[in-house]
Amino acid sequence: MKNEIRINKYLSETGILSRRKADQAIEQGEVRINGVVAQLGDQVSENDVVTYQGEIVSRKTEHHVYAYYKPLGLVCTAKDADPDSIFRKLELPVPCFYVGRLDKNSQGLLLLTNDGELSDHLQKARNHHEKEYVVRVDQPLTAEFLREMSSGVEILDTKTRPCKVVKQGKNTFRIILTQGLNRQIRRMCEALGYRVVFLKRIRECNILLGDLKPGEYREILGEELRILRGQAEH
């Protein structure tokens, strides 16, 4: 059979699942190839009939990417049962999933897409994609705090990567991360004796939050999208 690809890559290219989520769906028996339950590592071609949860899926999906201002109080989850899910408050032209997370008490830029390959590339830590935040803490910043934040902090049994930290006010700084550990900024600050009281993501790769208001979104198109895809591939 010509032009075969792995089933998880096929599913991610349909836009309904990221590759990691596709692996989970396969392990749970939710994917079939020509009526047979798929296994991890199976190969498929355009001649095969692939179904996910009983519905036929195709790679001929048109891909979209959106920049969304996630408001405070909403959570990054696809579970319809959660009344605070971003997808309970947001109506997009096509079904999408989020790229990375912002916790319930954080706000700002969140990328949404139905392009599983792009999502996977952007979320791989080894690709060192930049994410920029504005952070306010509960006490005045010191030179030692700024130095330790930028050089790396011990959290979650590891030391965070060196990053750029710039003081913006008495209690406020900007930080550019190239990794996405769970609640990383909050944990870094807590390890140094500070508590985050405000956290907003303002940039991811070349995509800026810009003038978006909480709850608003815009589609990423043209040169902006071309640059984003170029960064994701390197």
Image (spheres, rainbow, N blue to C red):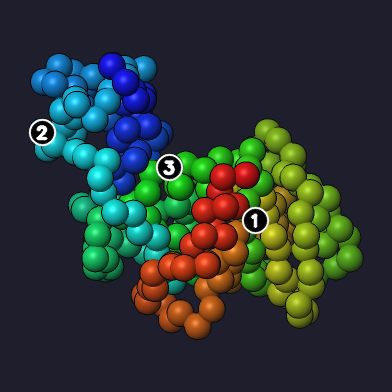
Front-most of residues 91 and 79: 91
Question: Disc 1 residue type?
Answer: Glu
Does residue 162 appear anywhere in the picture?
yes
Number of the front mark, 3 or 2: 3
Quadrant for residue 58, please give it.
top left
> Which residue lies at the image location 56% right of the left edge and 40% below the top edge?
124
The percent position of residue 30, horizontal first and vertical second, equals: 20, 28
Of mark 1 and mark 3, the one earlier in the sequence is 3
Of mark 1 and mark 2, the one earlier in the sequence is 2
- Report helix, strand or loop for mark 1: loop
Name the disc covering residue 3, or none: none
Q: Which residue is mark 3?
A: 117
Of mark 3 and mark 2, the one earlier in the sequence is 2
Front-most of residues 155 and 166: 166
Q: Which residue is mark 2?
A: 54
The quadrant in which the N terminus is found is top left
Question: Disc 3 residue type?
Answer: Glu
- Report helix, strand or loop for mark 2: loop
User: What is the spatial separation of the Cα atoms under label 3 and label 2, in whole angstroms?
Assistant: 23 Å
User: What is the spatial separation of the Cα atoms under label 1 and label 3, in whole angstroms?
Assistant: 18 Å
Q: Check disc 3: other Cα within 10 Å, few if <14, some if 14-19, many if 20+.
A: many
User: What is the spatial separation of the Cα atoms under label 1 and label 2, in whole angstroms?
Assistant: 38 Å
Does residue 73 appear anywhere in the picture?
no
Q: Which residue is mark 1?
A: 130
Quadrant for residue 227, please give it.
bottom right
Residues at badges 3 and 2 in contact (C-beta under 8 Å)?
Answer: no
The percent position of residue 133, horizontal first and vertical second, equals: 63, 66
> Which residue lies at the image location 52% right of the left edge and 53% below the top edge?
229
The quadrant in which the C terminus is found is top right
